[in-house]
Each structure stands twice: as C-alpha cells, then as structure tokens.
C-alpha cells in the first residue's frame, strides 16, 4: 500500500500542507454529538490505493491482454464468463478476462481487489494505459483511503453529518450495521449515493475494514472507498495515468465524490459554509468533483468506433451477400425501412435486402 507519507516521514510530493488538527467543541449548529474532532482519522496519515479496475477493449486484443496478465499473475484457466459475457479466462488473485463469440467485438478485463493489491498501483496504471492505447475504456475504478489507529470516528462523523442534512452531491445515504443475534457488530459503515443506471457514477462506502476482515478490533481500521463507474471511471483512470502525483489526484477525486455543507436555510451551496468537521478532516486537500460527461470525439476515438461497430459489420454483410461494401452503403443511403428485429444486424440485412432491378 502506498501512503501519503514518504519513508522519511515527510509529506509525499504534491501533498497539500496539513492544517488544523484536532478541533474540540460543539458544532457550528450547536450539535455536539459526535464531537467535532478528527482523532484517529487524520487524512495525511491515510493510505491511498487502487482497489478495483474494470476495462473494456476490442476483442482482437484477447491474446495480447492474456499474455500481459500472465506475465504478472501466471497461467490462466478457461472458464465461465462474467458481466454478461459467455466465456472467460481466470487468473490468480481473482483477475479475469471475459469475452463472447466473434460477433461480440469486445472483451472485459477485471482486476479485483486482491489483484490490485498484488500488482501495486504503478503496474495497474501501466496496464490501463496500454489498454487505452488499444482503444480501451475504463468502466470501473475504486479508490480507497485506509486509516489505521485507535479510536477512529470517521464513520460516526459522516453519519451524524448526514443526519443533520449536510450531505451534498448525492441524494441517498444508508447506514450499514449488521449484527449477530447477541447484538455483536459484524460490521459498521455508511454508504453514500446509488450504484447502477440511476447513479451518478460515484458511490462512496465508508466502513470498518477491521471488523469486515476480522483482522483488527472495531474503530482501529476504517476505510473510505469511492467506486467510480462508466464515464466517471474513464475520466479518473485517464487523470491518474497523466498525473505527476497519482496519489494526490486519487485522494482528491475520492473525496470529491461527496461534500458536506452546513444547513442554514439556504438552498444555494455557495451560501452554505462547509461543515466544520469536514474542513478539519480535509486538512487542506482540495477535492476534485468528477462528473459524467460525453467524451469529445476526435479522429482516434471515431476511428476506433468505426472499426469496432461499422466496418466489421459491413464486411460481414458483404461476405454473406456477395455485395460490395459500396453497394451495401448505397442501399442503406436510399433509406429503405428495415423492420425492427432482435436478430443480429447482419441477418436482419440479409432477410430484408431487395436486389436492385
């Protein structure tokens, strides 16, 4: 695990100066439960890491990406697919490549948490950078910040802030406190945001990693984990690859997924100061908000889309019909309606093609 502190005890390159420290006393709104302190969870002592990566890329690179992963993780085994793909190649530490038949021109690479821990962030970013050079796209990347100390209270601070209505940039939060029949905690945490199609592409989990793994007592190992998906994941991955200090940018993006502002009756965030505990916790770090957006089209991206989605289909139609690609394009340009069908495009074209007289 890479940390924000160098081996000599000094701050990592690019790390903002640490300000503040413990803040005693009641909150600005008069609430004094929990107290506004950052005991235990001190941002500059957090360990920053990449905990999961998913990348899609053209299927023609199946053998290339397999060889690259085998260099790091050893031989793969053929097995079932995942993420909607029919087949897969599975590696040690939970890594995998999923793909389907030749007609689905895409594959999916999963680097699990164990894989990311094994490879380390620099090897991960090198693999993702190579995938981008092959028209790849990141669809998920998880950034974590681990705190290990006594009497951690980050979960409590976040939950109390949510209860006061201070949470911004997402509309949902949910505490997680599974227990045994005897009342013993099996875990502690809080989730911010929503995953899936209705989500923003940013989902935050803050939980007691020590309780989850059973490796340490409660409140001695708490983790802030931001899951970026879809376009947000692709933006973050590109940012980390291009960064002069990936740890600082990863930290800023992970914390920028949400925000906490005091409740003072105003609907405008500009008129609502940041929550005091949040200012103390950030300790000078400037969060980066990553919003899903349409990636600008350029010749490289457009050419990749043409190769994957248009040219191969036209060639397949040409093989099956004996028509030239120009003849197929001319036919389509006439605007003749083709009935909606669940059949593959190639067979739909064949079924509806009317030779010119």
Image (cartoon, rainbow, N blue to C red):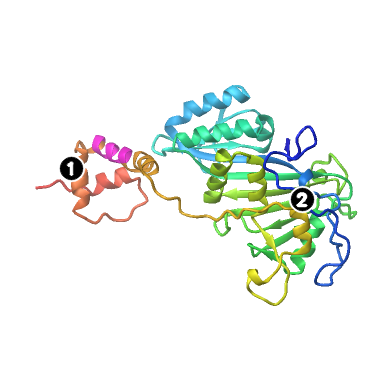
Left or right of 225 in this view: 21: right
Residue 114 vs 43, above or below: the answer is above
Q: Disc 1 marks which residue?
A: 327
Please tell me which residue lies in front, 147 or 191: 147
| Separation of marks 1 and 2 at Cα, in angstroms | 60 Å
Where disc 2 sits, the SS reads strand
Residue 221 spot, x, y in % from top left: 82, 45
- Which sits earlier in the primary sequence, circle 1 or circle 2? 2
Residue 202 vs 355, above or below: the answer is below
Residue sitting at 62 percent across and 32 percent down? 122
Q: Are marks 1 and 2 in contact (CB under 8 Å)?
A: no
Residue sitting at 75 percent across and 59 percent down? 278
Residue 23's label in the rendered image is: none
Residue sitting at 85 percent across and 58 percent down? 37
Circle 1: is it few (<14), some (14-19), or many (20+) Cα within 10 Å? Answer: few
Residue 229 spot, x, y in % from top left: 57, 49
Q: Residue furthest left?
A: 357
Residue 209 vs 89, above or below: the answer is below
Task: Decide whether residue 245 is among the magenta residues.
Answer: no
Asked if residue 155 shows in the view, the reply is yes
Q: Residue furthest right?
A: 182
Residue sitting at 44 percent across and 38 percent down? 135
Left or right of 273 in this view: 75: left
Task: Decide whether residue 312 is among the magenta residues.
Answer: yes
Query: Magenta residues?
Result: 311-319
Circle 2: is it few (<14), some (14-19), or many (20+) Cα within 10 Å? Answer: many
Left or right of 19 in this view: 136: left
Residue 207's label in the rendered image is: 2
Left or right of 297 in this view: 186: right
Residue 281 vs 307, above or below: the answer is below
């Amino acid at each position: 695990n890479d940390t924000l502190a160098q081996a000599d005890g000094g701050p990592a390159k690019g790390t903002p100066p640490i300000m503040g420290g413990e803040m005693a006393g009641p909150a600005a709104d008069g609430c004094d439960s929990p107290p506004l302190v950052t005991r235990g969870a001190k941002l500059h002592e957090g360990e920053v890491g990449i905990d999961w990566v998913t990348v899609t890329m053209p299927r023609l690179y199946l053998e290339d990406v397999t060889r690259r992963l085998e260099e790091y993780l050893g031989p793969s085994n053929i097995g079932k697919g995942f993420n909607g793909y029919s087949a897969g190649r599975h590696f040690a530490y939970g890594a995998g490549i999923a793909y389907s038949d030749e007609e689905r021109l895409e594959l999916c690479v999963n680097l699990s948490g164990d894989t990311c821990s094994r490879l380390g962030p620099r090897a991960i970013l090198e693999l993702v950078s190579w995938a981008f050079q092959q028209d790849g796209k990141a669809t998920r990347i998880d950034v974590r910040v681990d705190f290990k100390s006594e009497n951690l209270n980050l979960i409590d601070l976040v939950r109390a802030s949510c209860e006061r209505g201070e949470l911004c940039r997402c509309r949902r939060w949910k505490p997680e406190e599974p227990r045994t029949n005897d009342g013993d905690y099996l875990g502690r945490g809080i989730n911010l945001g929503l995953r899936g199609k209705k989500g923003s592409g940013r989902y935050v989990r803050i939980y007691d990693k020590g309780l989850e793994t059973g490796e340490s007592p409660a409140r001695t190992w708490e983790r802030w984990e931001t899951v970026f998906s879809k376009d947000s994941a692709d933006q973050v991955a590109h940012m980390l690859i291009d960064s002069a200090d990936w740890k600082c940018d990863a930290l800023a993006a992970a914390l920028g997924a949400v925000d906490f502002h005091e409740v003072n009756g105003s609907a405008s965030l500009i008129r609502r100061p940041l929550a005091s505990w949040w200012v103390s916790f950030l300790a000078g770090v400037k969060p980066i908000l990553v919003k899903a957006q349409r990636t600008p089209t350029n010749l490289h991206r457009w050419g990749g889309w043409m190769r994957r989605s248009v040219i191969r289909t036209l060639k397949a139609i040409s093989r099956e019909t004996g028509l030239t690609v120009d003849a197929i394009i001319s036919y389509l340009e006439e605007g003749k309606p083709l009935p909606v069908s669940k059949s593959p495009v190639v067979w739909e074209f064949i079924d509806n093609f009317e030779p010119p007289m």
